[in-house]
Amino acid sequence: MRAPAPSAEEHARVRAVLYLNGLRGADLDDAAQDVAMRMVEHAPTVSSRNAWACAVATRIALDRHRSRRRGTAALARLRLRGTSSYSDPDVALRESVRAALRKLDPDLRATVVLRYFADLPVGEIAVLLGVAEGTVKSRLHRAAGILRLELGES
């Protein structure tokens, strides 16, 4: 028996996870469609379809990053665009966090998104990403240090 199509809330959350994991434009649309198809075809009977969908979205984003290896050229382009200023403090904070997340390696970014956006516990993130709990903890620690430097906090 097939699972129901993703709800509007699930779809919005999946798109947000993909976006926070660095996917944009048509790439984001394609990845969201891939997640929706997997949800209809393979979504397990779990207590939280939303968490499962976020994990699938994260894995899809990681796969896309690994296959493209945008690397240093993309990072250089992002740095060139990072010179504008914002008058609204909320917009400035959002843009600063977005820029800082972009500077994280995909594995670190995925771990941060699952922990702080999807609000998953370390153990569940480890299972979803197929790594040890210690790896998740060390990724969160490294990411926090990088984000602190990027956001200017000590």
Image (cartoon, grey):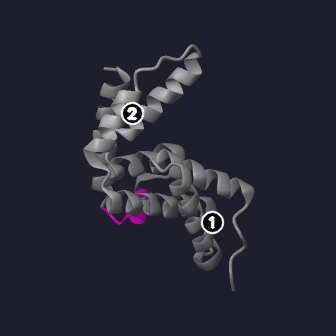
Q: Which residues are magenta?
A: 125-131
| Kind of residue at disc 1 | Ser
Secondary structure beneath label 1: loop
Could you tell me what secondary structure mostly forms the magenta stretch? helix
As drawn, which residue projects farthest toward the bottom? 1
Q: Residue at x 40, y 60 (%)?
A: 64
Q: Quadrant of the C terminus?
A: top left
Q: Position of residue 118 (x, y in %)?
A: 54, 49
N-terminal-most mark, 2 or 1:
1
| Kind of residue at disc 2 | Ala
Where residue 45 sits, quadrant-wise, is bottom right
Q: Residue at x 58, y 21 (%)?
A: 90
Work out whether 138 lies above or below 146. below
Counting labels gives 2
Asked whether residue 96 is drawn in magenta, I would say no
Task: Answer few, some or many: residues within 10 Å of disc 1's Cα (few below 14, many 20 plus, some between 14 and 19).
Answer: few
Task: Answer few, some or many: residues within 10 Å of disc 2's Cα (few below 14, many 20 plus, some between 14 and 19).
Answer: some
Residue 119 visible, this orientation: no
Work out whether 105 lies above or below 146. below
Q: Position of residue 35 (x, y in %)?
A: 57, 66
Front in this rendered view, residue 53 or 138: 53
User: What label sits on residue 47 in the rendered view?
Assistant: 1
Front in this rendered view, residue 69 or 111: 69
Q: Which residue is mark 2?
A: 100
As drawn, which residue projects farthest toward the top? 87
Front in this rendered view, residue 119 or 7: 7
